[in-house]
Amino acid sequence: MRKINDILKDHWGYDSFRPLQEDIIHSVLDHQDVLALMPTGGGKSICFQVPALAMEGICLVITPLIALMKDQVEQLRQRGIKAEAIFSGIRQKEIDVILDNCIYGNVKFLYISPERLETELFRERVVKMNVCLLAVDEAHCISQWGYDFRPAYLNIASIRQVLTDVSVIALTASATPDVVVDIQEKLLFKQENTYQKSFARANLSYAVRQVEAKEKKLLEVLRSVPGTSIVYVGTRKATKEIARFLLNNGISADFYHGGLVHDERSVKQEAWLKGKVRVIVSTNAFGMGIDKPDVRLVVHMDLTQDLESYYQEAGRAGRDEKKAYAVILCNESDMEALKAQVSLRHPPIDTLKKVYQAMANYYKLAIGSGQGQSFDFDIREFSEHYGFGHLEVFHALKKLEDEGLITFNESYYHPSHLHMLMDNTDLYKFQVANAHFDPAIKAMLRLYGGEMFNHFINISERQLAKFMETTEKETVTTLTKLDQLKVIVYDKRKDKPQVIFTLPRQDVTYLSLNKAILESRKKVAEQKVASVINYAKHQNRCRTRLLLDYFGEIQAEACGVCDICIAQKKQHATKKTEDYHHQIEHLLGEGPLLVEELMEKINPTDRDAFFDVIRSMVDRNELCYDDAWKLSRTQ
């Protein structure tokens, strides 16, 4: 078994682990079930990646976030580690190839969505894999008390019954005490085993400013806190408006949201990461998987739906452990709007059925068909065609996704990729018999090599066209024909929102939607909104302690750096100053005294404040010194 410190150094370049990481890794290597609660930026992925590399076999990683899945696979490959991902929307043949490579090849990590666990194909292949570890990321999704419950996560328990000797590591950035218990029960932990890094961030100053003119206050905050910043807003329209407002006021800014095409998102993100743009104004689509340690300020112009989301988004500030700020700008109308959104985000069953039926009609899907199929989805066109409101459709899709019926990806990007189906001998015969395809095949072999024969690889039609001195359109036509002739599997890139039917299209009459459960989740959402409003309105308790209480962590001391702690310090200092002023006036009313004599009589707990009061009173001519350097009241 390789030593974990050598693995860390060889693949990540670090000399030592962060606090708690090593303890978690040793627990995993001892084949214990582990729940790791580590705040955003705490290094959760290393807690399962390092021990998996120390063991023989493949690590299955379950996560619902396609963007994060792709990001981690790419990062592992860049470190020379074989990793693959299977998610909704990729073709059956590609899934087949990936699963075969996981059985017979040297793939070390396989990332899958929770919906994949119940498919017959995966069930047949997973028992043939040498699985060494099951990692469950975003583990709070398994709990109905969590802020992002996904019923598909409940399938993990049945996989554990198949992989009986495989231990589990569950990871999440935020969970309340009820959710901590629920995660371990639902994942069939052999014993309770939780490692929790404190949710306190000593370098992060939380603040809430209740103001009507939020844009004006935003300018004030950005001008008082220099450095890289993120401004979160609730709508795509607002991202553009606020970014334009900042630019017009001399602050370098750009906007970002899930509706942008992949290339636009990449350019904007890269400019911000490299410091070419100071402020990124975004919906919550921005930040997941992005590691920028020197963010000095995160501002929320709109309230989040729950404190878990707020904690994670605010936690993107100050990952370098230097002073940073997390500020909410809100007013009473924002709080009323937040409460009203709960009903919008939890549409009635009739609405869910109507939207589901409309989608089945839209894509002309017969009952029992469509499982695993991915479709481009234009929410505006769909809504107008069937007479729905855009937000009504959006929230219905999210709820249908929660129920495991579909997957909806509003910011979906999948590059063009292909796999060579023929072996070298058959391919040569094909080239001889079909000379007009020979230049394209030679170009693919020259640019992408033998990897095409083993698994799917990402390609660029533009690069191929340039190599063959032809047009991109003609290259796409050629690749499509080779796909039809079963020489290759060619999957053209997708860059539009996608709807994937996770299950076969259901008869809407028998659609499995439990009214009692849906109502229960709505009540949980209402409770979470109430917690957000309580946090925003609170005026007399340390904000860090409010957050820690919510997550079940007892913190005796106040943070000393949030807006409430600072205000209380100022109040305390003012009262102390007033007390010293009153005592000095009283004692000197009885006759002149040396400063040392005043100190002896008053015995100040804060000498600096005491001397400041004396200096201030002398400056205002309330006191004066005589020839013997005694203080007396000015007559």
Image (cartoon, rainbow, N blue to C red):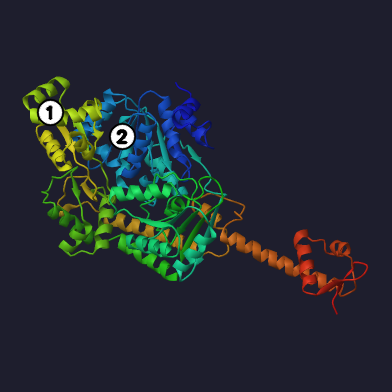
Q: Secondary structure at mark 1?
A: helix
The N terminus lies in quadrant: top left
The picture places residue 104, in percent across and down from the top left corner, at: 27, 23
Mark 2 residue type: Ile
Mark 1 residue type: Asp
The picture places residue 617, in percent across and down from the top left corner, at: 78, 71
In the drawing, what numbered circle is on residue 599?
none
Q: Residue furthest front?
A: 469
Q: Specify which label sits upstream in the sequence, 1 or 2.
A: 2
In the drawing, what numbered circle is on residue 159?
2
How many C-alpha atoms fall within 10 Å of the one at disc 2: few (<14), some, or many (≥20)?
some
Q: Residue furthest left?
A: 433
Q: Secondary structure at mark 2?
A: helix
The answer to whether any part of residue 190 appears in the image is no
Give left or right: position of 252 versus 374.
right
Give left or right: position of 255 versus 115.
right
Gap in angstroms between the C-alphas marked 1 and 2: 46 Å
The picture places residue 428, in percent across and down from the top left corner, at: 13, 22
Give left or right: position of 7 versus 127.
right
Q: Nearer the viewer, residue 499 or 33?
A: 499
Vertical placement of 143 versus 381: above or below? above
| Residue topped by disc 1 | 438
Tell me the residue at 76%/67% (across/down): 613
Vertical placement of 189 versus 6: above or below? below
